[in-house]
Image: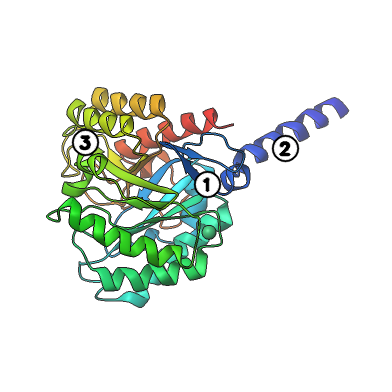
Amino acid sequence: MKKNLFVTLLITALFSMNLMAQPVKKHGNLSVKGTQLIDQNGKITVLNGVSYGWHNWWPRFYNKESVKWLATDWKCSVVRAAMGVEPKGGYIDSPQSSKEKIEAVIQGAIASDIYVLIDWHSHSIKLPEAKAFFAEMATKYGKNPHIIYELFNEPVKDSWQQVKEYSVELIKTIRAIDPDNIILVGSPHWDQDINLVADDPIQGFSNIMYTCHFYAATHGQSLRDRCDYALKKGIPIFISESAGMEASGNGPINYSEWQKWIDWCSANNISLISWSISDKNETCAMVKPSASSLGNWKDEDMKESGIKTRELLRKQAEKDK
Ligand code: MG
């Protein structure tokens, strides 16, 4: 009996340790060295997780309980709070309620000891508004190692020169308050033209990375070639949004191409975030309308892309043990 009790206690202890993976406790303050993300011990670090859908359309998932579920059950080491900027109910329209949603996820990530991207989820330049927002976020949260700033989800029509000027203004704003947390800079044309970034990167600031987004049924080897070109030129890449289907977010998942991206990220130690936690009737939505807003999702509440993403995240978390 005693032996059985000991074994039971040991298993319980191991199980709860597993549930309580603490990525930020382990990796702490992040920095960028060459093309790599480095942790507090100087070791190369890779973050893996999911993006919430646009906060203005899927506000119900923006709470600390769902973050906890994603951290413990899905084994995310990072989540992305995607603050819609332009649409109705977005930041321009409704700054206070927008910040409340984003901050619920930020505070949830801090409580669950995972990293969080504060994503200005916009498709055009809104410099004064972005400056005010990031200054406030840096003041409030910049001392926490958990925080990563993402300045511009996906530029669409703006040239790299315009995106670069916008980003430099925001980097200066953030750095005046927060000297060190990672800042992610968008690349033009839905985060596809990272080759243009590579030819003319931002100079004079530390802990900057650049985002590339892929949707595997649309973007294949030619985009990986651009990424390889950028890496060769010393450009640190962070994949802050990605998925297995077409760029529309819909259509069938291309599993073989998605796997090629996953293998490419793994070979190059590139952090990877999948889109998205929402319950829309499209392929990229990871859960069904039956899914609780607070997590605790069973398999029958999850869609194909959610089940596959959770499987991937659990595997990646094993590697980080
Ligand atoms: Mg800081």
In the foreground, 244 or 180: 180
On the image, which quarter does residue 59 sit in?
bottom left
Q: Where is residue 121 in the image (x, y as percent from the top left)?
A: 28, 59
Residue assigned mark 1 = 30
At numbered mark 2, what does the secondary structure look like: helix, strand or loop? Answer: helix
Dot 1 crowding, Cα within 10 Å, few <14, some 14–19, many 20+: many
Residue assigned mark 2 = 13
Q: Position of residue 206 (x, y in %)?
A: 44, 50
In the foreground, 284 or 131: 131
* 190 to the left or right of 3: left
Q: Which of marks 2 and 3 is in front?
A: 3
Do labels 2 and 3 touch, CB within 8 Å?
A: no
- Residue most extreme to the front: 204
**Cα distance between the residues tagged 1 and 3:** 31 Å
Task: Please name the amino acid that badge 2 sits on.
Answer: Ala
On the image, which quarter does residue 145 sit in?
bottom right
* 279 to the left or right of 271: left
**Placement of the N terminus among the 4 image quadrants:** top right
Dot 3 crowding, Cα within 10 Å, few <14, some 14–19, many 20+: many
- Residue at x-position 22% and y-position 56%: 163
Q: Does the rendering let one see residue 196? A: yes
**Cα distance between the residues tagged 2 and 3:** 39 Å
**Is the distance from the Cβ of mark 3 to the nearest ligand 1 atom less than 8 Å?**
no
- Residue at x-position 29% and y-position 51%: 279
**Cα distance between the residues tagged 1 and 2:** 29 Å
Tag of residue 245: 3
